Amino acid sequence: MTEWRLNQDRSMPLYQQLMQLIEEKIKAGDLVPGRPLPAERKLAEALQVNRSTVIRALEELTMQGILIRKRGSGTFVNPNKWGMQTRPIINWRTSLTPENLSVDTPYQRNVKQLTAQHRSREILDLGNGDLPKDLLPELKIPDISLGEMLHGEATFIKENRGIKATRESVQKHLLDAYGMTVPLEEIFITSGTQQSLFLITQGLLKPGDAIGIEAPSYFYSLRLFQAAGLRIVPIPMDGEGMTVKGLQEASLQYPLKMIFLNPIFQNPTGTVMSPERKQAILDYCLLKRIPIVEDDAYGSFVFDETVDNRPLKCLDKRQQVLYLGSLSKFAGQHIRIGWMVGPAAIIRELADIRDQIDSGLSFLPQLLAEHYLKSEMAAHLPVIVTALKERAERLQVWLKNRYGSEICFEPVKGGFHLYCHFPNKTDTEMDALLEELLEEKVVVKEGVQFGDRKNAVRFSFGHFVERKPTAFE
């Protein structure tokens, strides 16, 4: 047993000292996720405290989701984030930060080592969900003088929801793409989805709140939920998206303050929520007064015309949904512009919060976004969709040729990702499969990064064009 010693800080109760010690050992890597802690009796003897002190400390950390207690087996460091509630990192008294809780898997460490040793063009990065360079638009800087730009910047300071021209361009985009009619006062320009989510967690939620997310989901990997001290609750999915039964069971077990959805070409599964399921989710959330945050990152990238890609927001008649969009999947990371659509009062409140933390936007990126949406998107989007569809088809053929009946996946109908399962492979066999890909300099995303089982893998097909024939043919 590693050394266990309390600081004997008389200003802090012994059980809190032990909680702090356990957190520090997690931070240092002495306590590894999934591994058992020493038995309560041995800990009490080593620390020279009552066993009741040890029990209280372990129970407190279990309530926070940091530890898991299994009757007859012992106490373990929580290996995942489902159900975890941490204190927000703004509380400087705790050493338990999101970085300490997000321990890299062996595969992730191997990926970092590979990328450090080789040039990016030598690696086939199928874990990269960003738009590849060859599909980026040839953005043209609008013809505008410095004086006009400074005047625009001054105008924007007064319009903290975003400059009017950009909001009008977003308004027209939503109408053209989905037939969605949105009043201008309900549109808020942000620096992207991450800023939108940050403002929601800071302005509409508080530490300890339970939020529901799809299982699996890219939301699972976001550290900002941990940073805000939120408890994330998994809600199962089927072929039509988040299940109503799963949502009902989660809301009965936890007082859900909000649910987060990615219903169209969901990340990572690629699932498209059916119209019936969308309405059922809206109806249940209205009954329970649960607000919905919808991230529509991939809805425009449709390969199959039979797909109903309308966002949940299109069916929202009761102002239940905060809708998030972004240009990152259309124009890469060069235009860090996104938007939030929701009730005008909520939009004003979140815009004010952004002002208070001095996290506003510059005029120029909004101007570029307005220009792209107005002048370039109509011609550029079909180019992206055609290329992504062709690459998705090639990836699916390669995977079937390589793995045959060992691999299972649903045919891609749009989006950026192909989610695969190897149902009969053990954890050891999956480790070997991932290692074999790394030896060929092929990088993917493990299912565990989305809160799923180890036999799941996400392939992002946008970069499949860069594959080396000698490695695959």
Image: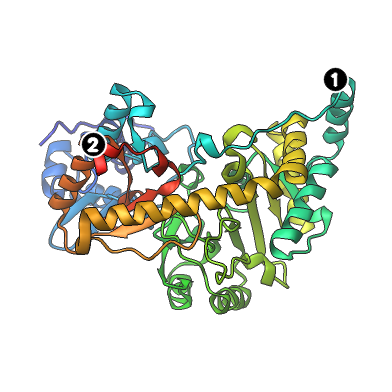
* Colour basis: rainbow
Q: Callout 2: helix, strand or loop?
A: loop
- On screen, 170 above or below 47? below
User: Can you give x and y, in whole percent of width and height, for residue 94 in the image?
Assistant: 41, 35
Q: CA distance from mark 2 to mark 1?
A: 50 Å
Q: Is residue 344 left or right of residue 20?
A: right
Q: Callout 1: helix, strand or loop?
A: helix
Of residues 281 and 367, the one nearer the viewer is 367
- Circle nearer the N terminus (2, 1): 1
Q: Is residue 96 visible?
A: yes
Residue at which label 2 appears:
440
User: Can you give x and y, in whole percent of width and height, for residue 25 in the image?
Assistant: 25, 34
- On screen, 361 above or below 385? above
The residue under the point 31% across, 40% down is 443
The three-letter code of the residue at mark 1 reads: Leu
Q: Is residue 420 left or right of residue 43?
A: right
The three-letter code of the residue at mark 2 reads: Glu
**Res 38 → quadrant:** top left
Q: Nearer the viewer, mark 2 or mark 1?
A: 2
Q: Is residue 4 left or right of residue 415?
A: left
The residue under the point 48% across, 59% down is 266
| Disc ID at residue 146 | 1
The residue under the point 50% across, 67% down is 272
